[in-house]
């Protein structure tokens, strides 16, 4: 089995995921896009040796996730309505959905608290332009 890490660009213009995936990244992971979804191939390699298949969260090595937060931030910025992120075993589907802020998602990943069976929804925040 293999870990599948995906980033869906919600409401992005056509080809945006391909542009993001095609940028030059310092990731040890490989990126490819299919439609509006960026697949982070090789994400399994980012798991720590003690990662447990049945654990509630992924034990990930931050050193192997270099530039992942920039990838998530860029994906969020180029999307119109936000991003959906999941990390599940190949052919698996998330069993829960949680809405979080981008900074909360980045913190979950950095501290190995990304849930194993959850799709994270990061919606675009409304910009407050003040009174009209």
Image (spheres, rainbow, N blue to C red):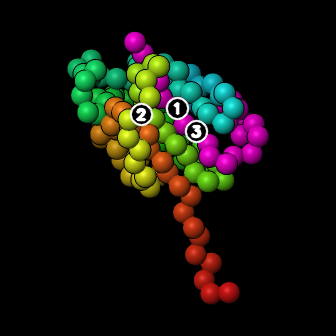
Rendering coords of residue 52 (x, y %): 24, 22
Residue under numbered circle 2: 94
How far apart in space, not on screen, are marks 3 and 2 (Cα)?
14 Å
Q: Is residue 2 left or right of residue 27?
A: left
Q: Quadrant of the C terminus?
A: bottom right
How far apart in space, not on screen, are marks 1 and 3 (Cα)?
6 Å
Please say whether residue 18 is one of the residues in the magenta stretch.
Answer: yes
Residue under numbered circle 3: 8
> Which of the pair 73/119 is nearer the observer?
119
Residue 36's mark?
none
Please say whether residue 59 is one of the residues in the magenta stretch.
Answer: no
Which numbered mark, 2 or 1, is in the foreground of this view? 2
Q: Are marks 2 and 1 in contact (CB under 8 Å)?
A: no
Is residue 103 visible in this depiction of the protein? no
Which residue is outermost to the front?
95
Q: Are marks 3 and 2 in contact (CB under 8 Å)?
A: no
Label 1 environment density (alpha carbons within 10 Å; few <14, some 14–19, many ≥20): many
Q: Earlier in the sequence, mark 2 or mark 1?
A: 1
- Residue under the point 34% across and 32% down: 116
Q: Which stretch appears magenta?
A: 1-24
Q: Is residue 130 above or below residue 33?
A: below
> Tag 2, which secondary structure?
loop
Rendering coords of residue 43 (x, y %): 45, 23
Label 2 environment density (alpha carbons within 10 Å; few <14, some 14–19, many ≥20): some
> Tag 3, which secondary structure?
strand
Residue under numbered circle 1: 6
Which residue is outermost to the bottom?
131
Q: Are marks 1 and 3 in contact (CB under 8 Å)?
A: yes
How far apart in space, not on screen, are marks 2 and 1 (Cα)?
11 Å
> Tag 1, which secondary structure?
strand
Which numbered mark, 3 or 2, is in the foreground of this view? 2
- Residue under the point 61% across and 42% down: 9
């Amino acid at each position: 089995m293999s870990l599948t890490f995906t980033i869906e660009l919600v409401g992005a213009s056509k080809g945006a995921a391909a542009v993001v995936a095609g940028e030059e990244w310092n990731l040890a992971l490989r990126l490819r896009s299919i439609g509006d979804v960026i697949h982070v191939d090789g994400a399994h390699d980012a798991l720590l040796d003690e990662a447990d298949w049945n654990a509630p969260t992924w034990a990930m090595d931050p050193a192997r996730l270099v530039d992942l937060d920039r990838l998530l931030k860029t994906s969020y910025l180029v999307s119109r309505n936000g991003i959906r992120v999941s990390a599940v075993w190949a052919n698996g589907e998330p069993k829960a959905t949680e809405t979080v802020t981008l900074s909360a998602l980045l913190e979950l990943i950095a501290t190995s608290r990304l849930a194993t069976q959850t799709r994270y929804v990061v919606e675009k925040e409304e910009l407050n332009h003040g009174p009209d």
